[in-house]
Image: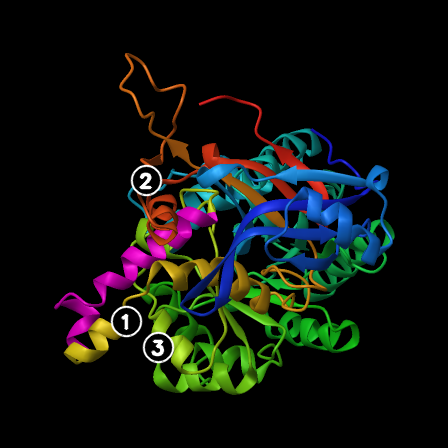
Amino acid sequence: MPPSQPGKNQVFFGTFIHAKKFGELEYLHNTAICVDVSGKIVAIEPNCNQQKAVETVYARLGWSLDTVAISVARDHRQFFFPGFIDTHVHAPQYPNIGVFGKSTLLDWLNKYTFPMEASLSSLPKARRVYTRCIRRTLAHGTTTAAYYATIDVNATNLLADLCFSMGQRAFVGRVCMDHLGPEYYIDESPDHALAATRATIDHIRSIDSNFEIVSPILTPRFAPACSVETMRGLSELQKQTQLPMQTHISENVNEVELVKELFPDSRSYADVYDTHGLLNEKMILAHAIHLTEEEADLIAERKAKIAHCPCSNSALTSGIARVRWLLGKGIQVGLGTDMSGGYSPSILEAARQAKLVSNHLAVPGGRSDDLSWEEREEAKLSVEEVLYLATRGGAQVLGLANKVGVFEVGKQWDAQLVDLGTVPDEVVEDDQAIHGNVDVFGWETWDERVAKWVFNGDDRNTKKVWVQGRLVHVQTYMY
């Protein structure tokens, strides 16, 4: 379904829930949020129904009834929530989700990942994969995604085109890898890698000149895959363009050892990026599982960001990232699905797993043996905290904190309408058509309803999705 253009001002009525701050959700009941034709929130009115809006709000905004489109979240089962932000996802790997074999990271790359990515030089195949990936992530409420593409310029440009036409806010990165990779899938030289990157930047600028919806993002795959010349060249390009960057760090123990072998003069994995000018406030580092204290301090000092990918970290047996520890260092953290290392396109699933994985740090054994009882308990994340990481945290990581992630005047309307299933008052023979995967009986508090959604929800609960005021997804099947 092509996204609709917001030809009218819009008013949304009902309950709005968002992360007011880390660890605290704010519930705005019986509220109206007014969004202008540019997709920006221009008013938030508490205790406001449609009649009050007509009588007071529209006049103040200079709106007339015939220029306004209205959406309503009904009763206790529906609410508006900010769109999810995926800070780390590999679009070309989407067909492989759930396929891990018995591999860990480096073997998995060679067996599954590189062959799939290379095959997307076929544009018909790339269109099929990318279209499905975007549709699926939108259906799960992801309004913004930081995508890794492939080394193929045309296929990368196609991903950018599709994100733009389908209305998903996106960062699209042409992957650079000229040092480590199979013969059939590797950049010819540093000059080739940089020229191809510039070509993608130019293409995205041609479709979205201000990078308002789709932006390029510089993408060295990870340190072992890139030559010194390529990393330095990307650093210079970043200084020239001020574009964001993304890469991987300390995902797997064997990967960390490989970095030591390849860069014997560097003090650490993080130091490799720092030495070559890539570690700054524009850099998004995925995983960060096996960081040392010194590395975390360096990342904090350089103001680089972290994409936490709990599903992938578990699926590939990479380890447990210490999110509370990272946050305590002053490092901004968001959530990533990391498909296809991750098995799900859902940031809600990533939030669920972030909560559960953090609990493991409270269990004696493994990494927790280095922690005191108080530190183990402190390591656990709450439902409210992981929802912050899924929205406001992700916005901070991607440099969008002034635009999205929360319901505030001046922010853009990137949002989802969530519908929870209601258990009928009377027992009927077959009530499956009445309620879905989240059962709300009606006596739950709002905190309890949100917790049920986090632990049981999926795309069946995502009824509508908007990006910058444009309706980009409507659920079309019944449950």
* Residue 450 picture location, percent across and down: 39, 49
Q: Amino acid at mark 3?
A: Trp
**CB within 8 Å, label 1 to label 3:** yes
Q: Is residue 13 left or right of residue 225?
A: right
> Label 1: how many residues lie within 10 Å, few (<14), some (14-19) or many (20+)?
many
- Kindly identify which residue carries mark 2: 101
* Residue 270 picture location, percent across and down: 47, 78
Which quadrant does the N terminus fall into? Answer: top right
Mark carried by residue 310: none
- Kindly identify which residue carries mark 1: 379
Which span of residues is magenta-colored?
Answer: 347-371
Q: At 13% from the left edge and 67% from the top edge, which residue is drawn?
A: 365
Mark carried by residue 325: 3
Q: At 38% from the left edge and 48% from the top edge, which residue is drawn?
A: 454
In three-dimensional space, the C-alpha distance between marks 1 and 2, rounded to whole angstroms, equals: 31 Å
* Residue 246 picture location, percent across and down: 58, 65
Q: Is residue 173 left or right of residue 437?
A: right
